[in-house]
Amino acid sequence: MLHILTKRIGTALIALTVSAVVAMAATRSASLLDGQITIEPPKVTATGSKIEVLMTINLTALHVKHEQSVTLHPALVTAMGDTIALAPVAIHGRNAILRLQRAGKLPSRLPDNIIDATTGRHSLLYRDTTSLTANDHAGQVVVTALSRRKASDPEVMYPPVTVGAYSLTATAFRPRYVYAMPAASVAKIVSARHRVGLTYADGSAEPIASTSANRVATDSLNAFISRCLSGEYPVSAVIVSASTAPGATAAARDVAAERALRIAAMIAAKFPTLADRITTRVAPNDWEGLAGWIERSSIQNRDSLLAIIERDDLDTAERLALMDRRYGAQASFLRDVIFPLLDNQTVIVQSIASALTDIKEIERVYTRRPDRLSLSELCQYFDYLNARRVKDCDDVLLKCLELYPNEPTARINAANVMMKRGNLTGAAANLRLAGMSAEAEYARGNLAALSGDLAGARRHFENAAATGLAQAADAIKDLDRLARF
């Protein structure tokens, strides 16, 4: 029996491939089962991160009885001694097929690798692909055959037959992912948000007093503050935030600021103990809020709209004009429907919570209320799961992004997860907001390499290596190795 070894690798970027060279003369063919099966010299090529094997299996001389089954096991044997198993080919007589179909082991329509030997088919064009397992490939294609004369007979095993030699070189860049860890000393801020929902007359800072909707909104706000005061953490700050849509006039921003002050006064009058902890702020040109909405949406031209919003060289009017010019329908929707939703007042209640150190307690909180964990605690929980090779532990890092979208550390780690999962577009969107830390530059280098931009990858790796990140220096060595080919 041919001993089969297989290896698996992650995503690979192929820098160079050299087509296979078949050493065996085209006039020769290898035979199995005493010449009943012949195999023409194969063609082996590298495409992307895959090796493809293509060869013709000639079955003209094969006589398979109704009960008989023959299975071929092609494989690549590299110069390094590794054996890479390829897809087997099964050849069955009519009764053998019927028996397997009745037993539910074969569908009524036979797969491509299952051959009905009674149909008069004389040859099979065999094709299979497998992942690269070594940088330098040179070796042989071998085939092993197993057969049964009838179902009750033991399998007869035939020795491997070499059907061709090949030589190809394929050099791959394999990213090493580096996760960013937040500073452990950062205080854990637990916050709760409440949209006030008061209605105003146009241009007025005073809520319309006589409406039932405003009375309901006021009662809801008071109930929200009461719940926060009775929570497990003491209230450290209350922030009344008034946001305006991009392009709002100075007068509109002044009205928003006055509305925030009125709401702060309402809270101070109802809850005097909070009076010295209440602050107000206005978020004019709320591009951050708009970007957050677009990121969470499935709107068309999503990435291009985000790229316009993130351009620091454009002022508000220029951004709006560019969005209108390039994406009229989407820009109108954002301006007429989404911007008004951003123009509101929100009360944010913050508490400073003591840090958790027991990993089991962190796990308990994560399963129930992950929003109560700091970014540092979430990353600590990821490290714990990752060290134990827990499946899908990367989901914790995506939860970090969900809970802390404004933290560069969360962006970097989420980008790493997306690159590992093949989502290069999502990784790029996160790295645009990830800052300029060594880990962020290193992640950008990986993204550039996976996208085929090796020159750009080098620039980012050099920036990361300048700060002493060891993995960046190793990545530069990988790029130097690629350049030699």
Image (cartoon, rainbow, N blue to C red):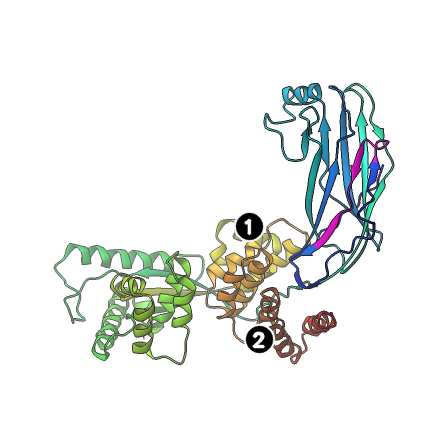
- Amino acid type of the residue tagged 2 in the rendering: Ser
Above/below status of 222 relative to 265: above
- Amino acid type of the residue tagged 1 in the rendering: Arg
**In the displayed structure, does residue 395 sit left or right of residue 294?**
right
Going 23% across and 71% down the picture, which residue do you hit? 259
Place of residue 24 in the rendered image (x, y in percent of width and height, measured from the top left): 83, 49
Write down the region rendered in magenta: 32-45
Place of residue 427 in the rendered image (x, y in percent of width and height, measured from the top left): 53, 63
Going 57% across and 52% down the picture, which residue do you hit? 363
Residues 21 and 315: in front is 21
Total numbered labels placed on residues in the image: 2
Q: Which disc number belongs to residue 437?
A: 2
Residue at the limit of the structure toward the left, as seen here: 210
**In the displayed structure, does residue 110 sit left or right of residue 153?**
left
Whichever of labels 1 and 2 marks the residue nearer the N terminus, that label is 1
Q: Is residue 347 magenta?
A: no
Q: Toward which corner of the image does residue 151 lie, by quadrant?
A: top right
Q: Which disc number belongs to residue 364?
A: 1
Residues 351 and 324: in front is 324
Q: Which secondary structure lies at badge 1?
A: helix
